[in-house]
Structures are given as structure tokens and as C-alpha cells.
Amino acid sequence: MGTDGVRRVERPKAAARAIYDRLSRRYDLLAGTAERKPREAALDLLAPVAGETILEIGCGTGYALSRLARAVGDTGMVHGLDLSRGMLEVARRRLVDAGLADRVSLRVGDGATLPYPDSAYDAVFMSFTLELFDTPEIPLVLAECRRVLRPGGRLAVVALSRKCKGSLSRAMVGLYEWFHERLPGYVDCRPIYIDDALTASGFEVKDRRPMGMWGLPVEAVVGFVHG
Ligand SMILES: C[S@@+](CC[C@H](N)C(=O)[O-])C[C@H]1O[C@@H](n2cnc3c(N)ncnc32)[C@H](O)[C@@H]1O
């Protein structure tokens, strides 16, 4: 555990890949409904527009990719990166079914070492993914986001938050962390301090939206790279 109480995520990347490959066909059933509202709120904060080039890290089964692809229209482009081939396969089918596959490029890769050039994106999006990276890796992921964003570009993150409001959310965070420590193969992420992480990595946080999911605090945050 760090001095700020944030738990570590010590499983290897290969284990994360195996978890999500195994979960991929059932992921939408297990998590899709609960995560939908916070994900939509974060997409509202990101406010994608026609013609933009946008990257989603940890794009999973592609819910956000389809909304991003609709928003950027046929003059824009969306890139989806994920560690798990299984999750990307579900995303690919969703995009083909929606007739959006030509606006989205999917790639297997690690968010800590982005396989994209500098200043290539207007915006980067992450939904329930930043809190999967181990504590020392979070600044590396955010530095990679800054590198691939153009000056003035923006990053929107929605994640489990450690900023508790009241005793119920504190108890739920405690319970969640208890499970995370004992069952890291099932509860692989943990609540983090999202806006502090963005600020420490040089983003100017412009907006935050605190929410809840199963009694746990969730927060959507948007930060900008200085132009
Ligand atoms: C909790 S799921 C969220 C999926 C999607 N963003 C959503 O909101 O439905 C986390 C996703 O991050 C991916 N992931 C985990 N570690 C990653 C890494 N190091 N780099 C890129 N993606 C990663 C997983 O494979 C999974 O698809």
C-alpha cells in the first residue's frame, strides 16, 4: 500500500490479459450495465466532435468506441488499444454490426507503452482502466497520454475513486480493497485518486463529476495539456 492508502496491483500483465480474455464473452453481462452510466458521463465530459482523432486505452468490448466513432463522423478516426485479444474481438464484432468498423482501428497493446506517435490525438479516453495499473505505472501511462496528445488536447478518465463522501462510501471502499487484496485474480483493480494523478502528471483538471456505483465512489475527470 502507498502512503496515500492506495493499494498496489501486483499481478503480472500476462495475468491481466488472461483474466480479460477469459471474461471477454461475458464482460457486458457482468459489468456492462453498472458501468454504462459513469462511462456515458465521462464521454459527455470528453465531448468528442466531428473530425477529431481519438484514442481509447483499455477499450474493452467497444461500448465507448461506438459512441466515439459516431461523434467523430466520417471525417474523424478512433483508435482502440487493449491488452486482451478476446475483448478486442468482441469490440470488433460490435463495430461491424453497427456499421462503424471503417472509422475505428483496433490494436493489441499496453497502455504504459503506447504504440502511437507523438501529438497524434485530439483526445484520449479511459474508462475503468487507469485503476488497473500498478501505482508506479500510473504516471507512466499518463505521461504516455500527454506524449500522444497534441498541445491543447484533452484526457477524460472515469475510474473507481478513493475520494469518499460519508461513512457508506468509506465502508464500501474498505470492503472492495479487502476483496482486492485477497482475490486479486477476480478483483484486479482498486480505487485511486484520479484528479490528483492527472494534476501530478501535468494535466490541467478542468472538470470532475463524482458519481457512485454499487455504493462505491466513481469519478469522471477531464484534464487538458497546455497548448
Ligand atoms: C474493466 S475493463 C473496462 C473496459 C472498457 N473500458 C469499459 O469501460 O467497458 C478494463 C480493460 O482494460 C484492459 N487492460 C488491462 N490492462 C491493460 C493494459 N496494461 N493496457 C491496455 N489495456 C489494458 C482489459 O483487457 C480490459 O479490456
Image (cartoon, rainbow, N blue to C red):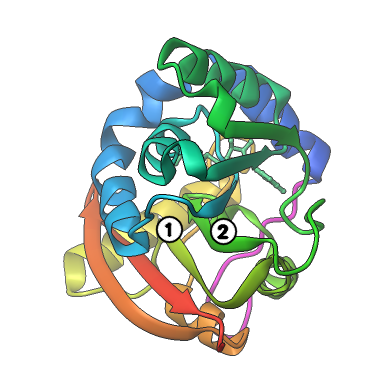
Q: Main secondary structure of the magenta part?
A: loop
On the image, numbered disc 2 is attached to which residue?
Answer: 130
Q: Residues within 10 Å of mark 1 (few under 14, many from 20)?
A: many
In the image, residue 49 lies in the stretch drawn in magenta = no
In this view, the residue in front, 170 or 150, is 150
Residue at 40% across / 58% down in the picture?
A: 158
Position of residue 79 relative to residue 154, above or below, is above
Quick check: 113 left or right of 106?
right
Q: Of marks 1 and 2, which one's residue comes earlier in the chain? A: 2
Per the image, is 3 magenta?
yes
User: Disc 1, ligand 1: is the CB inside 8 Å?
Assistant: no
For the residues marked 1 and 2, what is the alpha-carbon distance in whole angstroms?
A: 7 Å
Write down the residue under mark 1: 159
Tell me if 74 is positioned left or right of 79 in this view: left
Residue range in magenta is 1-11
Q: Secondary structure at mark 2?
A: helix
Label 2 Cα neighbours within 10 Å, binned few <14 / some 14-19 / many ≥20:
many
The N terminus lies in which quarter of the figure? Answer: bottom right
x%, y% of residue 148?
70, 65
Q: Are marks 1 and 2 in contact (CB under 8 Å)?
A: yes
Q: Residue placed at 55% from the left, 52% from the top?
A: 54
Q: Where is residue 12 drawn, in percent x and y?
A: 81, 45
The amino acid at mark 1 is Ala
Picture coordinates of residue 137, whole percent (x, y): 74, 67
Whether residue 26 can be seen here:
no
What SS does tag 1 mark?
strand
- Name the image quarter holding residue 105: top right
Decide: is 55 above or below 59: below
